[in-house]
Amino acid sequence: MSIRLVIADNYPLILDGLENLFRLEPDMAVLARCRDGGETLRAVRQHQPDILILDLRMPRKDGLAVLQELHEQKLPTRVVVYAGELSEREALTALRLGVKGIVLKEMAPQLLVQCVRKVHAGGQWLERQATGRILDKLFQREAGARALTGVLTPREIEIVQLVVSGLPTKAIAKELYISEGTVKSHLHTIYDKLHLAGRPALLRFAQDNGLV
C-alpha cells in the first residue's frame, strides 16, 4: 500500500521537484500539492494523507499556524518539515506541535525519502548534520524548563522567560498586564526559591541551564 503524501511549499519549482522525487518511489503517491497554508489545511482534511511535507515559509497562513491547527484538531497525518532555514524558535515550536521529521533543503533529496519512510513507520527523523546544533540547544532548553516546573509556578516561569529575553521590570509588567510591584514581588520569590542574589544571578542561572 502506498504512502500517501500532501506536499506544501511556496515555490512551484520546489513542488515540481518534490513531485518528481516521490514519483520515482513505487510505494509513494502525491495526493495534492499546495502553495499556501489555507490550501494545505483543506488538502489535509480532504485527503487525510499519511504524511504532510511542509515548508514553514508560506503566505496567508504560515507553516507554524498550519501545525497549530493540525495539532488542535488531532488529525492523524504525520508532518515532516522541509525547510530552507529554521530558527531555534521555529524548530522548538514545530517539535512541540508534534512534527516527526525535520529535513533542510540543502540536504540530499534522497534523505527526504528516507525520512518519509521512517516517519511513516512510526519513527522520528531529525537530520542532525543540518540541525544538530539547534536541536542540542533546544533539548537542553527543554530540560532546563522541565527542571524549573518542579520549583516555580507557571507565572514565575513566564517572568523568568521575559527577564531572560531582556525585558526590564516595567516592560514585563506591561506585557503581563500586572503592576511593577507585582513583578518585583514575583522576582523576589523566584530569587528565594532558586537561591539567587538578584537579576544578574538569574541570568547566569538561565545560561547555565540552557534557557537562553
Image: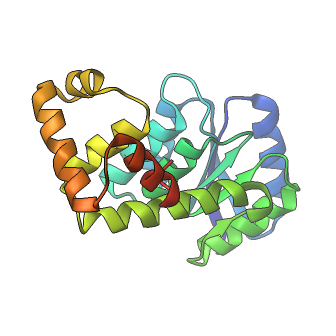
Residue 98 in the image: state x and y as whole percent.
46, 60
Residue 9 placed where, x, y %? 67, 36
Residue 179 falls in image quadrant:
top left
Q: Is residue 78 visible?
A: no
Task: Name the outermost residue toward the front.
Answer: 197
Query: Seen in the image, is 184 located left or right of residue 212?
Result: left
Task: Using the image, determine if residue 60 lies above or below residue 70.
Answer: above
How many callouts does the rendering have? 0
Whether residue 25 is situated above or below residue 58 in the rendered picture: below
Q: Name the quadrant containing residue 177.
A: top left
Closer-to-camera residue (14/176)? 176
Kindly identify the residue that appears in the image at 85 percent across and 55 percent down: 109
Closer to us: 67 or 153 = 153
The residue lying at 47 percent from left, 51 percent from top is: 204
Query: Quadrant of the rendered structure where residue 88 is?
Result: top right
Q: Position of residue 113 (x, y in %)?
A: 78, 63
Residue 71 can be seen in this image: yes
In this view, 117 is above or below 65:
below
What residue appears at the point 37 percent right and 53 percent down from the top-left corner? 71
Percent of width and height locating residue 13: 82, 32
Quarter that holds the N terminus: bottom right
- Left or right for 196, reference 206: left
Image point (49%, 58%), residue name: 141
- How does the figure colour the protein chain or chains? rainbow
